[in-house]
Image: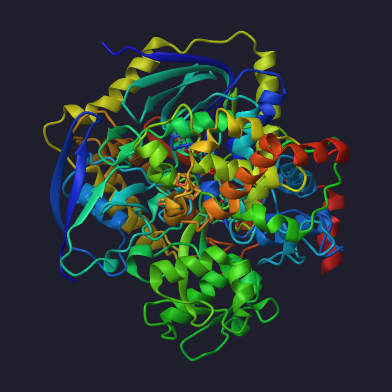
Amino acid sequence: METFEKHEHDVLVIGAGGAGLRAAIEAKAQGVNVGLVCKSLLGKAHTVMAEGGVAAAMGNVDPQDNWQVHFKDTMAGGKMMNNWRMAQLHAQQAPERVLELEKWGALFDRTPSGTILQRAFGGHTCKRLAHVGDRTGLEIIRTLQERAVEAQVPVYMECTVTHLLRAGDRVCGALAYWRSNGKFVVFTAKSIILATGGVGKSFRITSNSWEYTSDGLGMAYALGAELIDMEFVQFHPTGMVWPPGVKGLLVTEAVRGEGGRLTNNKGERFMERYDPKRMELSTRDQVARAIYTEVKEGRGSEHGGVFLDVTHLDGESVKKKLPSMYHQFKDLADVDITKQPMEVGPTTHYMMGGLRVDAETTATTIPGLFAAGEVAGGMHGGNRLGGNSLSDLLVFGRLAGIHAAEFSRQNKQGITPPDVEIQAATRQMLEPFDRKEGASPYEIHDELQDVMQNLVGIMRIEEDIKTALTKLEGLKQRLKTVRVTGSRIYNPGWHLAYDLRNLLNTSEAIARSALAREESRGAHTRLDHPKLSPEWEKITHVIQKDGDGMNLSQMPKPQMPPELAKLFEESH
Amino acid sequence: MPDVTFRISTGSAEQNEEKTYRVPVAEGWVVLDAVHYIQAHEAPDLAVRWNCKAAKCGSCSAEVNGKPKLMCKTRLDDFADGEEIVVYPLKTFPRIKDLVTDVSWNYEVAKKIKPFTPAKDTKWSMDQRDMDRVQEFRKCIECFLCQDVCHVLRNHDKKPEFAGPRSFVRIANLEMHPLDTASRLDFLKNEGGLGYCNITKCCTEVCPEDIHITDNAIIPLKERLVDEYYDPIAKLFKVFSGK
Ligand SMILES: Cc1cc2nc3c(=O)[nH]c(=O)nc-3n(C[C@H](O)[C@H](O)[C@H](O)COP(=O)(O)OP(=O)(O)OC[C@H]3O[C@@H](n4cnc5c(N)ncnc54)[C@H](O)[C@@H]3O)c2cc1C
Ligand code: SF4
Ligand code: SF4
Ligand code: FES
């Protein structure tokens, strides 16, 4: 009989990236008892990889910037699919959140007058991204990590949560295992904040780390939570394409922000044909499609990408402004970017969709369960602007902390997770060890990545998506026979076997939503429905578990109040 | 490309077994690619720690042919043709399994370092030139390769008395932050054991972020310590100048 290590907190935060750390710091500041769980070591979450910057309308470089302009840019970039209230709160609160980081020790690059320097980025009409060279994420996560340590938030590192536990309709805890020894842990909490990040590992070519197996989405879905906008997966236009070992690795948009030019094999600056006004600083969906088209029509580079060139800029300043890109190419591809162009192509980057949350409180549709960061949906609509994620983490991480703490205070009566739920969950986790034969988790994952990459990728068509859904069903059946060998001690095969359950569910949600949206909008491109349709602008797709199946429904999108709607009329 | 032979150290804290694999490699592969290949095809439970595979998170530290390295940044074509590649976990920290070690001690030390402490009425304006040297320290990705290689920890296991180069980088960052007001010299002198460091510069050599750990962090800290504790004139001067 399995014994369980047990921990109890008022608020349990799952995930220690920017959103989770910010949430934990805030909940702690509200005076409740907080625990923070993450499946990697502290400070290694995906946020550490963010490069280009954090968007906040501080107006240090472009004084005409303000929250309204940022709000408008965000909505326009999201092709008006964004939850307007989230976009508004985000634009209003981001500057304060960035300045607060500085008070906690962050050191952003400066303007000559000593304020925080801001750089240009795609889709932002003002110079808006606060940054530290091209390692902004590292600066932010380290600052938050140190703040959380200072606040004495207990952190459970390399502890993977596998199930959310529920009593009645309310969430009341979570089951997890220690990666180091495979032993189970039961957390009891009055409220839970999910901040587990995205889904990139469903795709073959991605800028995302191994952690992006959509655990939070999968676990909340299993509990009956609603997922929205799942068709909107961002393919970042510039990932590395060569050598094969680094395919997909991100080339930050800051390269273009600092003046980098995109050219094809004829030496043409092809963005002239797609978006002559904004050129390289067009939104990511447009640039990604442009690159895809150039390559498809035979104007690509040797390794199936296009060229991104900064050789016309001053070499020393490139090294100073983009140090990690300089090293990334030099160390991994033998390319000196101050002398030779980079080869780049689209890479799966970010999930705009996610858990449906209330804009003010980040509450999901499950009582006691909150969500912030990439795992939440709505903020970015059909396409996220670069830099708007880091600010999203800070703004909504904080709101999640406040409201989850408040929920825990109003529901002082903790509920203990029912034993039957815990037993069922652990049995599910251990089954793969019992099988004498069965599929390898690595094989299933490999096939999944091909299915999503080839059939539900950057250019979609009905027939492909239907094939994908059939194949996903087949993979789900195979997952039922997945076999794991070895012990429970730090066993990556076992970890992947669990991840696959979530990956398959979210992949199906992506495919179903993509099939249903018969138009092209933002990051979602349908070759068989190439136009943006005004009718579809009003509709959000909602995915929810329905018995053993998955249900897709439509929900009318909340409409902006007139004073905000006016902002958009004026510009036309 | 020809197959490459990998010898990988597997096992637990108590027991070590080297296992040999032939891996068909592709152009531009790094050591971590090969380890992943072995996981997917031969040893599904082979334990390895990694996250970003972009040399940004500092998770995949190991010892490759005897040298502390990030596995995701160590290219296979940097080795001679036919050279066997031997991968061991970090030696300075206890092994959990295979290539994964227990580095939690580093996080415990971090808790003891006095956090950033600005003055109450701080004006949040800074000159880039004052920040440049501090930003160097903030590049640290906490890979702990410097901790692994430092003989004070590696050979003399002074873990309770010596905080190690990573901690000194962190402290240098805080001490030289233009707006910080706290002093961590007492920690450096006592608990942190800065005196154990005899400036061998091994830490600087392995730092994947090219932080000049010894020249820019440790030596200036040592100088500050000397000024603070052993130089009566400097100390008097401080008393009078209020610094
Ligand atoms: C290469 C790259 C560059 C980027 N650059 C930028 C940029 O310049 N600007 C910008 O705004 N955005 C950028 N982004 C996007 C942005 O970095 C991410 O969207 C953001 O960091 C996500 O933060 P998060 O807090 O939601 O999740 P993460 O930082 O991914 O954290 C997720 C946390 O959840 C934990 N977790 C997950 N599952 C479990 C589980 N089952 N149990 C326990 N813990 C779990 C993980 O361990 C981790 O701690 C970039 C993304 C990439 C990949
Ligand atoms: S210089 Fe000091 S800290 Fe660095 S390795 Fe040598 S003894 Fe250790
Ligand atoms: S100082 Fe360098 S070697 Fe040491 S932990 Fe930081 S990045 Fe790694
Ligand atoms: S995996 Fe992140 S540094 Fe190697």
* Viewer-side residue, A337 vs A126: A337
* Viewer-side residue, A83 vs B214: B214
Q: Is A248 situated left or right of A86 in this image?
A: left
Q: Is residue A477 visible?
A: yes
Residue at the image position 41 percent from the left and 59 percent from the top: A456
Residue at the image position 65 percent from the left and 37 percent from the top: A397
Count all numbered tags in the image, as a single digit. 0
Residue at the image position 29 percent from the left and 57 percent from the top: B31
Spot occupied by residue A205 in the image (x, y as percentages of width and height): 39, 61
Tell me where residue A542 sits by quadrant: top right
Tell me where residue B242 sits by quadrant: top right
Quadrant of the drawing holding the N terminus of chain B? bottom left
Q: Is residue A502 visible?
A: no
Q: Is A142 situated left or right of A110 in this image?
A: left
Quadrant of the drawing holding the C terminus of chain B? top right
- Position of A105 relative to A336 (above/below): above
Spot occupied by residue B120 in the image (x, y as percentages of width and height): 85, 35
Residue at the image position 65 percent from the left and 30 percent from the top: B186
Spot occupied by residue A76 in the image (x, y as percentages of width and height): 71, 61
Tell me where residue A178 sits by quadrant: top left
- Position of A42 relative to B125 (above/below): above
Spot occupied by residue A487 in the image (x, y as percentages of width and height): 21, 29
Q: Is B16 situated left or right of A249 in this image?
A: left
* Viewer-side residue, A207 vs A220: A207
- Position of B198 relative to A425 (above/below): below
Q: How is the image coloured?
A: rainbow
Q: Is B20 situated left or right of A136 in this image?
A: left
Q: Residue furthest bottom?
A: A266
